[in-house]
Amino acid sequence: MIRGDDRGEEYGDAYPVEVQWGRPLRMTAADLRPRIVLLPGDGIGPEIVAAARRVLEAVGEFEITEQVVGGASIDVHGTALADEVLEACRRSDAVLLGAVGGPKWDTTDPQAPRPEQGLLRLRKGLGLYANLRPVRPSPALVDASPLRDERLAGTDLLVVRELTGGIYFGDSGRDGDRAHDTCEYSVAEIERIATVAFDAARRRAAGKSRTPRVTSVDKANVLETSRLWRETVERLAGDYPEVELEHMLVDNAAMQLVSSPARFDVILTENMFGDILSDESAMLTGSLGMLPSASLGSDRPGLFEPVHGSAPDIAGRGVANPLATVLSVAMMLGHGLDRPDEAAVIEAAVDSVLQRGLRTFDLAGAGEEPVGTDEITEAVLATL
Ligand code: NAD
């Protein structure tokens, strides 16, 4: 299959290909631009996605469209993700999301649409079963971390979270004054996410003189799904003899993440544990505003988004940190569009801006004058 970006110069402006992804039979250079759908969402989403769009447009040519999701979509369509928006995402090469949610749409009425339903439907609809969250505190930001420097030193980990199974997708309901949420996993679901984790561990250690390690996190002393998880991961590990596998209970993992984060390489875990542990890991960097994520399926498009939420408390004030979204653009280029060089350029620009001392308010320490969303974005653009 011809991928979105290896259709190249040897063909000049036009070359014949079979129809694929709904594109014309003969394509011009303009037709070959990767198609990106932007879903700004709610709260600070529109501000940070606008900043990320400027960075994206500065590094290459893309066919970009914007669509609504979450609360913004509920306001327009009465549902958190309209069918036509999901379809546009399916036809794209990559999707960049801001964040969804806010007090305007908070409700306990089980019948009312909720913004997060848009995200869950998007993940399910695009078959995105793997969520990757790298945590590598920028050297310029060690002071912003709540951990002491010596505890943080050497931290470079990746959380691989299963995204389409478990308790968030099991049967749930209410019966009078009782409610239930069911957690289910199949061997096939566990195998495919574990494969992502083992492959990632192998890739991260390539060319380095260290043993790759996967820490599989579960609650096997209590949950049957966790026991199936452990057995399955153990079996799959046989295919990766060079990768060290350890199992860890989730409560212990939560402790170790703050007491000795540098001991981790790849953390593999199920949906709900991953949701919680990845936010905990996020704080190691000092701010949720710094962490990107990628959600991948078996094929394109992947979904790229910052780890943080829609931060309604600071929305519309021009102070949000756009760097997690800018770094999500880098992940999109690197993991989603096979353009690692452009990804590296963006990451280097972000590092350089931080090295020079620019800080949004969430990163600024005592005595540091914070800059706004526009100012830090301009600095990244100037460095590019
Ligand atoms: P949040 O991540 O939105 O905010 C937590 C804190 O971090 C807030 O004080 C906020 O101001 C700050 N913060 C977050 N992102 C920031 C940024 N880029 N720059 C500076 N500061 C930043 O989490 P929350 O307050 O628990 O949730 C708010 C809303 O977001 C809720 O409606 C929630 O459901 C939703 N949410 C959405 C997603 C998503 O879309 N993926 C994820 C988590 C929460």
Image (cartoon, rainbow, N blue to C red):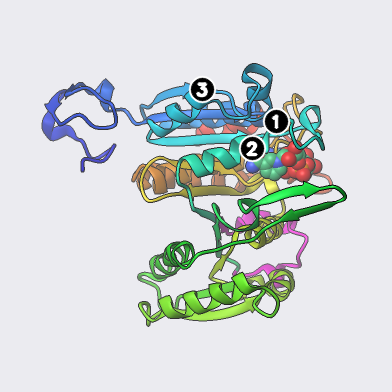
**Label placed on residue 66:** 3
Spot occupied by residue 9 in the image (x, y as percentages of width and height): 16, 33
Q: Nearer the viewer, residue 3 or 227?
A: 227
Q: Amino acid at mark 2?
A: Gln
**Label placed on residue 117:** 2
Discs 2, 3 touching: Cβ within 8 Å: no
Q: Amino acid at mark 1?
A: Pro
Label 3: state its secondary structure.
strand
Magenta-colored span: 133-154
Query: Is residue 16 found left or right of 172 in the rendered image?
Result: left
The reply to whether the residue tagged 3 has its Cβ within 8 angstroms of ligand 1 is no
- The residue depicted at 80 percent of the width and 27 percent of the height is 104
Is residue 295 at all visible to an observer of this figure?
yes
Q: Residues within 10 Å of mark 1 (few under 14, many from 20)?
A: some
Spot occupied by residue 278 in the image (x, y as percentages of width and height): 65, 58
Residue that lies at the very extreme toward the front in this rendered image: 176
Q: Nearer the viewer, residue 190 or 104?
A: 190
